[in-house]
Image (cartoon, helix red, strand yellow):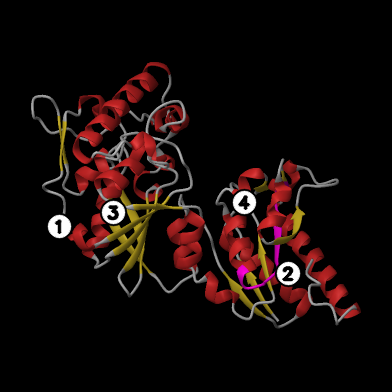
Amino acid sequence: MKLVFASDSFKGTLESARIAELLEKAARAVFGDIETVRIALADGGEGTVDAVLASSDAKARAAAVHGPLMEPVEAKFALFDDGRAVIEMASASGLTLIPEEKRDPLEATSYGTGELLIAALDAGARDITIGIGGSATNDGGMGFMRALGAVFLDAEGAPLEGRGRDLIRVARIDLAGLDSRFADTVITVMCDVDNPLTGEAGATYVYGPQKGASGEALELLESGMRNYRDRIKDLTGIDCDEVPGAGAAGGIGAALYALLGAGLRPGIGIMLDLTGFGDALDGADLVVSGEGRADSQSMRGKVLHGIGLRAKEKEVPVTAIVGGLGDGWEGLFRCGIGKVIPLVQGCVTLEDAMQKSEEVYYDAALRYFRSVKEKKDSHPEMKFYWT
């Protein structure tokens, strides 16, 4: 018997790697010495590099960079022997790096993420994946590009720092000094949102308030982003309001796509490739996955959607243990998920589940595996006793 454990984290309660450990413990308590594969997953935000390191043969590398307010930060990235690397924006330009009272997207910069990318290049990487979730910035990726050698000039020809407040002042973009190694480097972005760069659904109005912007600051940032959009179009001919995902992570999606030529892809597909999920499915009898809340959004490129479709291709059944259920969760059955088990049901409240997350999760896993064993022992001729 071979079981594969690959769940998303339950935000604020259980990390992906810990969930895999609990599943393995519960399965072995019921079935004894079985073959298991534990795969840690993340969505491109904080913890992405840790998930890759935990589920692959990549090595951790450290880099001294500047944080979102230009403070010293040590960030790490994952480096594979074949020249691939994974970096995450959250570790260099993340919202969690700034105390809540100091959050200000007018001042924040993505410069450190650019430095982290350069560190990966210096380490020999030429196929680099960037997770851009969890950012503190709304600078359109100007700081990021400046660290790579790009120059943003104001109307008088003076170079700009590349903070959110500089967006309105950009008159010209000069890419002549861009690091030459990008000519033979493939950049892929883990991007799970489809926001355009500007407008009501754009970077500023949707994500700016989460990063500390309100009122006049939001208006200034949006005016600046529209100016920045036009300057990018002047240079490249690309209208970033027509590029789904350009508004991701404070607009760094626009810089990566239009100025650096990066590809924007759903994060779960990339993570499954990086962590060897496809190989893990070979000979597997079951995948146990999950996420904090299953609802209609789960079918929009989230972990369960990706897991279900990949497993369905190899006819491996999938059971999802989830924190709770929301409207539209039944759609999971259409993408390869055979059984869904919510933790929050009956006499278990959300508060109890969060306070005793490991105990509640382990008990649910134990009950599930016991029910499976009972079916298996009673009806050995059944093929899909998992559901």
Question: Which structural element holds mark 3?
Answer: helix
- In the rendered image, the residue lying farthest to the top is 216
- Residue at 12% over, 24% down: 155
Q: In percent of the image, x 48 and y 43: which residue is there?
A: 193
Numbered range of the magenta stretch: 313-324
Left or right of 357 in this view: 93:
left
Q: Which of the 4 image quadrants contains residue 365?
A: bottom right
Is 384 positioned to the left or the right of 303 in the image?
right
Could you tell me which residue is drawn at 28 percent across and 46 percent down?
112
Give the residue at mark 3.
116
Q: Are marks 4 and 2 in contact (CB under 8 Å)?
A: no
Q: Rounded to the nearest whole Å, what is the CA distance between mark 1 and mark 2?
A: 51 Å
Based on the picture, tell me whether residue 207 belongs to the magenta stretch: no
**Residue 26 - label:** 2
- How far apart marks 4 and 1 lie (CA) works out to 41 Å
Name which of mark 4 and mark 2 comes first in the sequence.
4
Neighbourhood count class around disc 2 (C-alpha, 10 Å): few under 14, some 14–19, many 20 upward = many
N-terminal of the pair, mark 1 or mark 3, is: 3
